[in-house]
Amino acid sequence: MLLSLFYCLSPAFAEEYTFNISETEKKPYHIGGNLEFKPILFGLDKNTSLYKLKFYNRDEGSAIEEYDAKLQLEGSLEKGIAKFSVKTNTDYKKSYLGEDQQTTVYEGFLSIKPSSSLSIDIGKKTLRWGTGYAWNPVAFIDRPKDPDDPELSLEGFIVASADYIKSFQGPLKTVSFTPVLIPVYNHVNNTFGAIDKLNFAGKLYFLFYDTDIDLVVLPGGSKTTRYGVDFSRNITTNFEIHGEFAFINDYKKKFIDSNGTNFEKEYDAKNYLIGIRYLTEKDATYILEYYRNGAGFTSGEMRDYFGFINKGYDSYVSTGSNALLKKASTVTEGNYGKLNSMRDYLYLRVSQKEPFDILYFTPSVTLMANLNDKSFSFSPELLYTGITNLELRLKVAFIAGERLSEYGEKQNDYRAELRARYYF
């Protein structure tokens, strides 16, 4: 009786658990990406210098809206020892300035791996050097992160690079060497620095006594010579410490006084970062970093810059001439307008995974403080991932500071955004 029952059930049993080995084989290609929609509301502060610089000849009211959309596509094709990878980014923005759309190739490179210890890459690539979370002082050949959203994808540069890895027994477990060539010409990497240069950079990596160490160099060319070192080590399984130090030779800083006189100062700048990452038993993550930007502006230099903008605005109101404001806009671009353009910053992020057993829900808060002028931004955030392939994030940033401070002179005093990102 039992034998007959077994034979009756066995076809259904076999059909339910059929194993197809082709389903587990690695495919030679990959296609994916994400689509994002992000409406933003900015609460404007009409008394700040950056509001006056941007809106001196228009009245946008107490708040402005912006609608952003982004499509990121990525794919790869692999055959033998060769693999081609590509990532594109299309941005759409609708704001008070109108509509704008731009498509950029973030990465597109050919990787050849003739052996397990050697790989060669040629094309547009993001190298992602450094161990810091919000900042990377040693990322000499990467575009700077946005500390407000440091996990965003970045556009790379056209490079030729190689990775050679060697493993050992003993305290020194791994050594790798990464040489990089960066051509800079009129239509190739022309935002990297001085054109008509072929730049060389290199990174030497060690895994020594369970500590990751990188030695980095960019020996002149389109930029002045710079050296760097970084490290990362897990003190315990849930506590990590990391740091970076960069030396920039003959850095040239351009600044302006409150009367509009231009100055240039050349010196050796030292940038460094120290940070920790700690995960508690209850799945709370703490990230704390201190960043010293030796190439940044002092509090006095920033006050002079803001003072010049205010002087230009007063001149516009009294005479109708915007000449001084145009000059202020010129020194802002790529200079005072850089992210975290002053000297000393503190970054703290605390996130809690699934508090009170609320599945797929992660609240967090982020504090970014300018230690020189005591201004700061504070950003609570709610993240929900309970719908397959969909990520929903609500984030509000509150900005505060005294007059003539970095955050106190921002054009808005709060920002609220809702991000919906679908992965495919």
Image: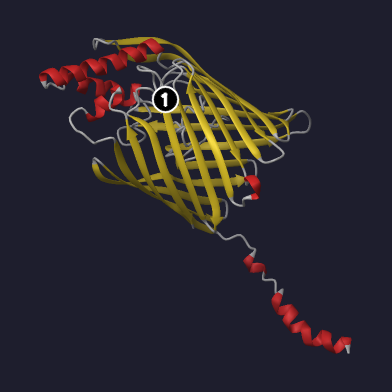
Is residue 99 positioned above or below 400 on the image? below
Q: Quadrant of residue 56?
A: top left
Residue 165 visible (yes or no): yes
| Amino acid beneath label 1 | Ala
Seen from the viewer's position, the closer of residues 417 and 207 is 417
Taking the image as shown, residue 238 lies to the left or right of residue 400, namely: right
- Label 1, secondary structure: give it: strand
Taking the image as shown, residue 104 lies to the left or right of residue 201, namely: left
Q: Residues within 10 Å of mark 1 (few under 14, many from 20)?
A: many
Q: Quadrant of residue 61?
A: top left
- Residue 302, x across and y down, in percent: 36, 15
- Residue 191, x across and y down, in percent: 35, 31
Is residue 302 positioned above or below 222 on the image? above
Residue occupying the far left of the picture: 319
Q: Quickly name the residue at label 1.
A: 400
Number of numbered tags placed on the structure image: 1
Taking the image as shown, residue 335 lies to the left or right of residue 344, namely: left
Seen from the viewer's position, the closer of residues 273 and 231 is 273
- Residue 180, x across and y down, in percent: 50, 32
Residue 153 visible (yes or no): no
Taking the image as shown, residue 235 lies to the left or right of residue 49, namely: right
Q: Quadrant of residue 6?
A: bottom right
In which quadrant will I find the N terminus?
bottom right
What residue do we see at 78% from left, 82% from top?
A: 10
Q: How is the image coloured?
A: secondary structure
- Residue 39, x across and y down, in percent: 37, 46
Is residue 97 positioned above or below 346 on the image? below
